[in-house]
Image: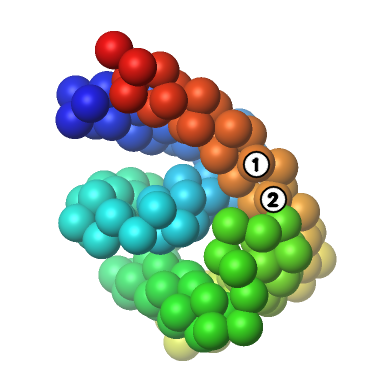
């Protein structure tokens, strides 16, 4: 089961990296991290977050810290949201995706301003909307595929 879990996350990381190369500004690791948070597997989530941070911080143009803020916001929003919602519900995922889309805009705007980097507000809004709109279907696909894959791992 452990090997199958590791292989699943390696495949997820490969797909997420491929998606991010095709859709600049999208964090395709976020739906997977959300899925891991929902499973309440804290050690797994920590390792996944470190791997995602390495990719995000290593490929971005902003100074170190944007990814830490981004994933820190995910953890805070998840912790607060679970007080009010069932974390595996679609309503929770939709609200979290909308909040994270807004956080995307705020974090990038703030850090770009601090570093005096040029920033297209139109592009920022487009990326934030894409983040908010793509997280739910990506999470849903990962949720269904993971449940099916891990169920078969239990049967073996």
Residue at 39% x, 27% y: name it: 150
Relative placement, left or right, of 152 versus 86 is left
Query: How many residues crowd mark 1 within 10 Å: few (<14), some (14–19), many (20+)?
Result: some
Query: How many residues crowd mark 2 within 10 Å: few (<14), some (14–19), many (20+)?
Result: many
Q: Look at the image and tell me in which quarter the C terminus lies.
A: top left
Residue 58, position in %: x, y?
A: 30, 51
Q: Mark 1: which secondary structure?
A: helix
Q: Mark 2: which secondary structure?
A: helix
Q: Looking at the picture, does residue 154 appear above or below residue 35? A: above
Q: Looking at the picture, does residue 9 appear above or below residue 139? A: above
Relative placement, left or right, of 3 versus 17 is left
Cα gap from disc 2 to disc 1, whole angstroms: 6 Å
Q: Foreground: 17 or 97? A: 97
Q: Look at the image and tell me in which quarter the N terminus lies.
A: top left
Residue 104, position in %: x, y?
A: 60, 70
User: Residue 153 occupies which quadrant of the picture?
Assistant: top left
How many marks overall?
2
Q: Mark 2–mark 1 contact, CB under 8 Å?
A: yes
Residue hosting label 1: 140
User: Residue 63 occupies which quadrant of the picture?
Assistant: bottom left
Q: Foreground: 111 or 73? A: 73
Q: Looking at the picture, does residue 73 appear above or below residue 37? A: below
Q: Which mark is residue 136?
A: 2
Q: Foreground: 38 or 114? A: 38
């Amino acid at each position: 089961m452990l090997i199958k879990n590791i292989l699943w996350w390696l495949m997820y990381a490969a797909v997420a990296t491929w998606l991010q190369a095709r859709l600049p500004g999208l964090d395709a690791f976020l739906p997977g991290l959300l899925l891991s948070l929902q499973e309440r597997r804290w050690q797994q989530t920590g390792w996944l977050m470190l791997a995602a941070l390495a990719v995000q911080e290593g490929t971005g143009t902003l100074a170190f810290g944007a990814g830490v803020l981004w994933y820190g916001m995910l953890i805070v929003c998840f912790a607060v949201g679970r007080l009010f919602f069932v974390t595996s519900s679609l309503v929770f995922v939709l609200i979290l995706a909308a909040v994270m889309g807004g956080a995307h805009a705020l974090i990038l705007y703030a850090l770009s301003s601090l570093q005096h980097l040029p920033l297209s507000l139109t592009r920022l809004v487009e990326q934030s909307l894409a983040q908010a709109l793509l997280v739910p279907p990506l999470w849903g696909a990962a949720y269904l595929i993971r449940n099916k894959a891990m169920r078969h791992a239990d049967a073996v």
